[in-house]
Image (spheres, coloured by chain):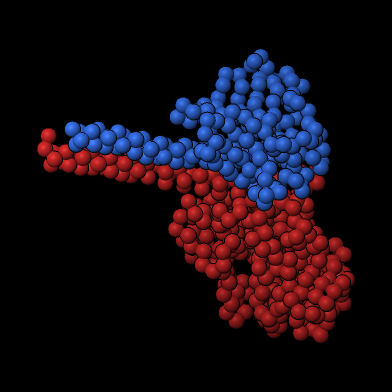
Amino acid sequence: MIGTVALIGLVIATGLAYTIITSYIEADVTKQQLNQIAEHVALNLVKIVSLVKFANYLNNEPMMKVLKLPSDLGGKAYVIKLMNGTISGQGCYVYTQLVTREDIAASSPILLNSTQTRLKLKTEGDARPLTYPLPVRGGNEGIIQWSSTVYGGERAGADIVVWGLTLDIDTTWAGIGVWKPQGGG
Amino acid sequence: MHIYEYLFTAIIIVTILLASSTMIGTLSGPSRSVSEKEQLKVAAQKIITQLLLDTGDPSDWGSDVTIDESNLKAFGLAKHGETTRDAYVLDPDKVLRLDNTHPLFIHPSRIINLLNLGKEYGLTLEIFPAIKVNLTIDSNEYKVKVSSEYGELPIFGADVTARMYYASNGAINRSLTLTSQTRANGECTFNFGNISSEMKVLILGINYYGVRVVKVFPAGSVAKAHFVGNHLFLNEAYNISGNEAYEIIVEKRDGGYMIEDVKFSLDKVGDVKFDLTYVEPSTVAILAISEDGTKLIFASKEVNLTYSSIPGVWSFPFAYSVERSVIIGGSAYIVRLYLWRMSW
């Protein structure tokens, strides 16, 4: 009798241990995916900023690039944030995390110093004024709803974008957001 | 059940758990490794985009001698233009500041800091001419060998334009401009006649189907200097004869290159620092003679450097490299970035 109970206990413990191990590995894989997404967003942000700096600032038109990102990670929603850690010495960075588990997160540096240069990144907590939303071709093409936080994935009529806008010779804005084409809801 | 049967069953269960855990771990290992390398690749592309397409801040930080490590706000090597800009055209004044012999050298730790890379990444940047040029001197003959950077294969049919500048009787003289084409072994020879002076500099313009490289060879006893914007920095304190400097200009023309010089005056603003009244945009080198006539001072905009965040040999087995062709001062160069993570 004791042996049977012990065996049942062992089976349950084994199952639990297996679940813990697999969830740890799953978390590790998810973290890798979040890291890839963060790197991808940071790369495209750096590219769009370079492109915007090449443009003539007199046109006052935002430039953007639609990012093809997975809609979820293993059925779990994730969030992308643009953070400013300049005070803590981290600089600006892209931060990605699972919505349901904040401990599963990753980050990628943006390589650009936003506080001292002409570039202004729309990071979390940035209260500097900027037109919202940003109209593209006077709003006829669509609008960019900029935000320091966007939920990952493709949705019908709303794509995640990186955007940049040179307002004048001393001011270039850049950030992430959601692109809503005309009639796209 | 007998006690041994229980034990045996328990051992089997534990073995299955261990085996399956090991298998899961082993199976996810390669995909994790691929994923990490992919991240490194994206990070390397991000860094090279920033380095080669961004001007940094201030945008003319290379030629502005008041800008040093402490007040450089953002790092980028692209050439700034007030009206137009070309992609992958770098500012020689910015690039030369990565040379550790430069008086306004920017330390790699500062660059790592400006790029927000923290202690997570290490990098090495190599910048070298797209075409390799070697010079051997045999009496009055100057043998130029042109080869590719990859495997040093000889380049046949490259147009080479050469002109010698030399100091004689306290003045700077110049030879005729000679042109030649490399043979099958990648070599061509120039003979400038008997130049008795030991203080001479050979300027070469090489053109291989539009890929242009300018080389400046000190072919004798000369004193190296640096020029940044319109400032000339000497390695030792000299007075300059007549407070004059010759700017060497290499410009394309029909059928080859023109190597010419323009004379401008200098103002001494420090023991080793002079200001030029004007610098021609296509200047590739500056020549001057010391007041006592014993030194030919030369500064060139030629780049060939390795810049690394770690000292010594930087061979990292897991480094990812990315390469781009760029133009620096009108010459074709290769920029190669090696990036690695300090820990995974």
Q: Residue at x 69, y 25 (%)?
A: A145
Q: Residue at x 82, y 72 (%)?
A: B273
Left or right, B47 with reference to A167: left
> Nearest the camera: B314 or B134?
B314
Q: Position of residue B123 (x, y in %)?
A: 56, 57
Could you tell me how many numbered marks the image carries? 0
Left or right, A42 with reference to A29: right
Q: Residue at x 81, y 66 (%)?
A: B231
Which quarter of the rendered picture does the N terminus of chain B lie within? top left
> Nearest the camera: A120 or B285?
A120
Q: Position of residue B112 (x, y in %)?
A: 63, 56
Give the quarter of the image for residue A179. Answer: top right
> Would you place residue A102 above or below residue B277 in this image?
above
> Nearest the camera: A52 or B28?
B28
> Would you place residue A113 above or below residue B275 in this image?
above
Q: Residue at x 64, y 61 (%)?
A: B108
Give the quarter of the image for residue B170. Answer: bottom right
> Would you place residue B272 above or below residue B294 in this image?
above
Q: Position of residue B240 (x, y in %)?
A: 83, 78
Left or right, B196 with reference to A32: right
Note whether residue A36 is visible.
no
- Write down which chain is painted blue: A
- Write down which chain is painted red: B
Q: Position of residue A136 (x, y in %)?
A: 72, 24
Give the quarter of the image for residue B286. Answer: bottom right
Note whether residue B10 is visible.
yes
